[in-house]
Amino acid sequence: MAFEIELKVWVDDPQALEASLEEIALFVAAYDKKDSYFTFPGENNGTARTLRLRREGEVVTVTMKEKRVVEGIEQNVEEEFTVSSFDKMKQILEALGCRCYIEKRKKGKKFRAGELNLELSEVEKLGWFLEIEKMEEKDDPEIIARARDEIRSMLRKVGIEEDKIEPRYYTEMLQGKL
């Protein structure tokens, strides 16, 4: 089990931010992620729990998250594994009573600075975002607090004000809750 601590902020000038990231972080890869989000049987929209089926190139990943937001920063419990076929996994999920309630596509570039992952993404229908993420092995309050401090420190380092923090999940925003 992994614990994801993540901050998402709106980006006004993606080119300037990309230049800043290139100076302070290591470029990892460009990406094009196509996500389908599924409800669990008996649930409506996956706000507290998410089951995501992701296509990124030839790789298909299934992710289940138990989600929560604390002071604008996501703190999620995450389980993830790969499968060989998007279509077959989708059929299995639907046979189990899950249904796709929203799709999301984001393209961008991933960077790494120490133990932080930074993704500069254009999310279709929403705009540009920077996600700063740290993965931890334990849901320990002290470890989580240090990770939150590291993330906020990186936010300051790239020159983005905290009023640009977006506490909502992409799925909420895509469902028209802007």
Image: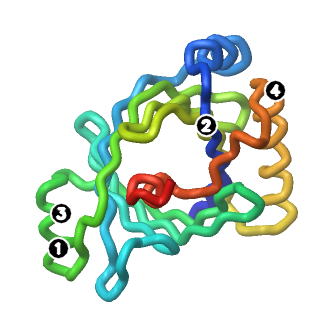
Q: Which mark is residue 157?
A: 4
Dot 1 falls on a residue whose secondary structure is helix
- Residue type beneath disc 2: Trp
In the rendered structure, are the residues bearing label 2 and label 4 in contact, judged by CB atoms less than 8 Å apart?
no
Q: Which of the two marks, 1 or 2, is nearer to us in this view?
A: 2
| Gap between marks 2 and 3 measured at Cα | 31 Å
Quarter of the image where the N terminus is located: bottom right
- Residue type beneath disc 1: Glu
The image shows residue 165 at horizontal and vertical percentages of 69, 45
Write down the residue under mark 3. Answer: 90
Q: Which of the two marks, 2 or 3, is nearer to us in this view?
A: 2
Question: Upstream in the sequence, badge 1 or badge 4?
Answer: 1
Q: Residue at x 33, y 79 (%)?
A: 40
| Gap between marks 3 and 4 measured at Cα | 41 Å
The image shows residue 58 at horizontal and vertical percentages of 23, 37
In the rendered structure, are the residues bearing label 1 and label 3 in contact, judged by CB atoms less than 8 Å apart?
yes
Relative to 50, say whether 31 is above or below.
Answer: above
The residue lying toward the viewer, choosing from 171 and 76, is 171
Dot 4 falls on a residue whose secondary structure is helix
Relative to 158, say whether 99 is above or below.
Answer: below
The image shows residue 59 at horizontal and vertical percentages of 28, 42
> In terms of image quadrants, where is residue 139?
bottom right
Write down the residue under mark 2. Answer: 10
The image shows residue 103 at horizontal and vertical percentages of 30, 53
Relative to 123, say whether 113 is above or below.
Answer: above
Q: How many marks?
A: 4
The residue lying toward the viewer, choosing from 11 and 148, is 11
Q: Residue at x 31, y 67 (%)?
A: 38
Dot 2 falls on a residue whose secondary structure is strand
